[in-house]
Image: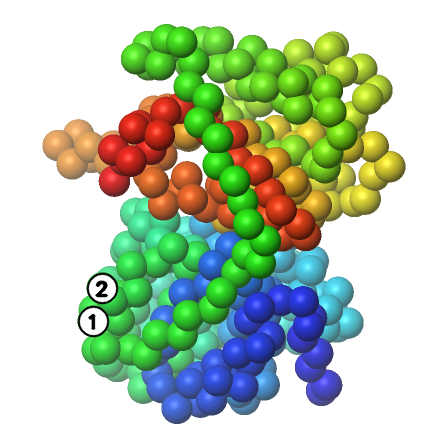
Amino acid sequence: MQLNYPSNLPITARKDEIVQAIQEHQIIVIAGDTGSGKTTQLPKMCLEAGRAADGAMIGCTQPRRIAALSVTERVQEELGKARMVGSKIRFQDRTGPATRIKFMTDGILLAETGGDRDLRAYDTLIIDEAHERSLNIDFLLGYLHQLLARRHDLKLIIASATIDTEKFSKHFHDAPIIQVEGRTYPVTTEYCPPDNEDDESTKDIDRLVADQICTLMARPGGDILAFLPTERDILDTVGLLRKELADRALILPLFGRLQGGEQRRIFRSSPQRKIIVATNVAETSITVPGIECVVDTGLARIAHYNVRAGTTHLPVARIAKASCDQRAGRCGRVGPGRCIRLYSEEDYLSRD
């Protein structure tokens, strides 16, 4: 099978090096900046390295369902063989006997260890967005660390945009690290904190974001991506924008529970300027094309595990500095970008 790689993706320039590393090492770490193409191209490079042999699959995990589904469609299009690429998320399994590349949430792979402790269905696993360090990702990496000692035929690729490469490499026996550059255009950052920045309430965040976007729409420019913490915040902001901008822009929400048809609208070209109002699902994996400006609230729902109670809750909290950088990296792909942070520079520098 002839494999082609988009020439505009930075990871394509490192293809031969990555393929050779997959062939020669059991574990490799790929540190790929936002927009490098690692999520869509690494499975193809595994195929070129001779993986997915004898009926086994290349398993690729994503932290979120929306990312697993959208990346599946993209790789199906690039390979031109839809049956070869499948996906599995909760309550939906789109794989079959011909599947050789399987995209899934990290929770699905973790659940599969209960029925197949050696994960014999796979000869290669790619743990993408490892920097997120969710409970699922941490459990998986710990499990795979032990499994690799039993299964010498299994290959592991740890991929992320802002990974702490040295720590991961040392944990996995000094695995080789390959750094792939991402953004090619400069992004300017502006800090626009609200007057009451010390007030941790988010009750007016929809108005704050809508006002900032309306100011941006007053002059020519490209598409806008805004990050808000919750689905309710997104719907309120979209409502305000549609009322104030009417038909001057295509205003689209983006969150994990959105139906597939609605999700796909964000990837389609439009004669109007697009405004995407999203949760942190747009922070990693999903690349929204044509974004010129990012508006970042610096907030998200973040899972916290209570050891004493044995429960997980999802409060709205400040995101880490690495996640702020991830959000800024959503622009600057096709031309110079601009990131407007609705918090102070001091706040940004104080984050972990």
| Nearest the eye: 158 or 195 | 195
Element carrying mark 2: helix
- Residue, disc 1: 170
Q: For label 1, count other residues whose C-alpha is less than 10 Å away and answer few (under 14), some (14-19) or many (20+).
A: few
Rendered-image quadrant of the N terminus: bottom right
Residue 154 pos. (x, y %)? 38, 81
Q: Please indicate whether residue 15 sits to the left or right of residue 260 in the image.
A: left
| Nearest the eye: 190 or 201 | 190
Residue type at numbered disc 2: Lys
Q: Is residue 3 above or below residue 81?
A: below
Which quarter of the figure has residue 115? bottom left
Q: Is residue 74 above or below residue 327?
A: below
Q: Is residue 126 above or below residue 52?
A: above
| Separation of marks 2 and 1 at Cα, in angstroms | 5 Å
Q: Please indicate whether residue 254 sits to the left or right of residue 220 in the image.
A: left
Which quarter of the figure has residue 203? top left
Residue located at (44% from left, 84% from top): 22
Q: Could one spot residue 105 in this view of the protein?
A: no
Residue type at numbered disc 1: Lys
The answer to whether the residues at label 2 and label 1 have Cβ atoms under 8 Å apart is yes
Checking the image for residue 167, the label placed there is 2
Residue 171 pos. (x, y %)? 21, 69
Residue located at (53% from left, 78% from top): 14
Q: Could one spot residue 338 in this view of the protein?
A: yes
Residue 277 pos. (x, y %)? 61, 29
